[in-house]
Image: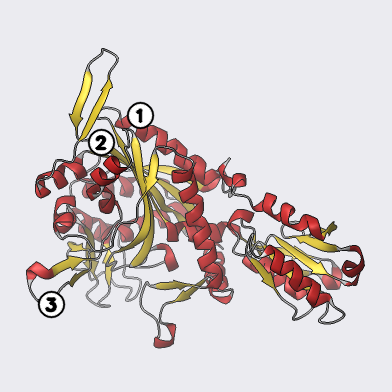
Amino acid sequence: MSEEIFKKVVSHAKEYGFVFPSSEIYEGLGAVYDYGQNGVELKNNLRQYWWKSMVQLHENIVGLDAAIFMHPKTWKASGHIDGFSDPMIDNKDSKKRYRADQLLEDKIERYQKDGKAQKAADLQEAMDAALLDNNLEAMKQLIVDHEIVCPVSGTRNWTDVRQFNLMFSTEMGAMAGTEDNKVYLRPETAQGIFVNFLNVQKTGRMKVPFGIAQTGKAFRNEIIARQFIMRMREFEQMEMQFFVRPGTQQTWYAYWKEARMKWHHKLGFGTEKYRFHDHVKLAHYADAAVDIEFDFPFGFKEMEGIHSRTDFDLKNHSELSGKKLQYFDAELDENGKAYGNYIPYVVETSIGLDRLFLATLCAAFKEEQVGEGEQKETRTVLSLPPALAPVKLAIFPLTKKDGLPELAREIMDNLKYEFNCFYEEKDAIGKRYRRQDAIGTPFCITIDHESLTTQTVTIRHRDTMVQERIAIADIQQLVQNACSWKTLLD
């Protein structure tokens, strides 16, 4: 049933202008997608929700927009050139390549669905141990022992597991073909923050603890890209690096872990849709890490990570660049001793905007039976929080004559500066309502002949389908109150 719902969400996303396969007229490009006219509005609103909560509402967090291209030494210092890879395995019959850990994770999910909880727990423990030790042979043996087959060929004719680097590389400058001209498309946005640490700290006169936030594109050469926009080769991240005094990182890690979960809960999709998953195998830079997972139709998957990155990044960039990336802390501790110069520790929050987009679509997508008897029908609706809706208000003249379009256009012209509006004259009013339900528009107003004399309209509420008569002069305040960012940020 969940797989069927996911198929409907993917189909809905294309049919109603949310997400299209990239370069579709050329049969598409694997794991690359374009956001359509409604998708780009929803995506922008989700990004804004994050930005307002992280930057606008925090006096000690500021924003940044770093370039995608960075000096190649950046990725040497960060560890990406030497260690940014996934364990891959090939099936010799289908010639298809898979991530070994994902094959094992899928097997664990199947065990759980089949009621084999102990088998699932044992395999999870064995996989975690293999990942922790970077034991590729052990991972291969688990695939063999649990009789995991290739989804395409149906055979178990596997190669050995090996590591595959995920970074895209290209060349910059006139001397193409030389190693000196090799640059990388950034695989994450965090490093742009770290190399600008001193620039932001000094020009903004920032005092520890403080944060730097950034949203932007990142690129990973995912071999196994699947589940629609869940795992793509070009995606968008929203990251915040919070710089703290050494020794306080665990306190701030706990703070941001709780704060970020509260942020997700405010979307109103249900607290049971989220859970924490602590990392067994920590990244080379971390002393603590947890994922916030969301219950997608295909199971709980990572949507956001909170990591205590220690001083790894600033220390490595300082050593490789020869520049002192330190902070002078003039304040005193409780014993009256000055802190002096130190390299700050970092707590990171990192969320995938595309995954958040997908989670929002999946949670908001509903099919409801409405009407009775011969009038009974299925209504497809996106129950989005009004602040996130691509269109806030749809404006419908009941007919195309008698001055109704003129009054409708006048209302449209007055309100389009305040929020995103949509105007339509075509088809019966019921069909127009259904189309707006499908894209998540919270309000529709209908201009009828009574509107010409009373200066009132009928406003329809998306979720309840209740209709009421209100004054034209009251439309703006009603919609603004319902769609205010305060409804999510308070």
Residue of label 2: 345
Q: Nearer the viewer, residue 193 or 354?
A: 193
- Residue 131 visible to the viewer: yes
Residue of label 1: 251
Q: Nearer the viewer, residue 101 or 158?
A: 101
Alpha-carbon distance for marks 2 and 3?
39 Å
Q: Earlier in the sequence, mark 1 or mark 3?
A: 3
Point out the frontmost of discs 2 and 1: 2
The relative height of residue 430 versus residue 296 in the rendered view (above or below) is: below
Q: Where does residue 247 sit, x and y in percent of width and height?
A: 26, 27
Left or right of residue 73: residue 69: right
Q: Earlier in the sequence, mark 2 or mark 3?
A: 3
Tag 2, which secondary structure? strand
Tag 1, which secondary structure? helix
Q: Tag 1: Cα neighbours inside 10 Å, few (<14), some, or many (≥20)?
A: few
- Identify the residue shown where x is 76% and y is 57%: 475
Q: Tag 3: Cα neighbours inside 10 Å, few (<14), some, or many (≥20)?
A: few
In the rendered image, which quarter contains the N terminus?
bottom right
Residue of label 3: 174
For the rendered model, the colour scheme is: secondary structure
Residue type beneath disc 3: Ala
Q: Specify the quadrant of the image occupied by residue 251.
A: top left
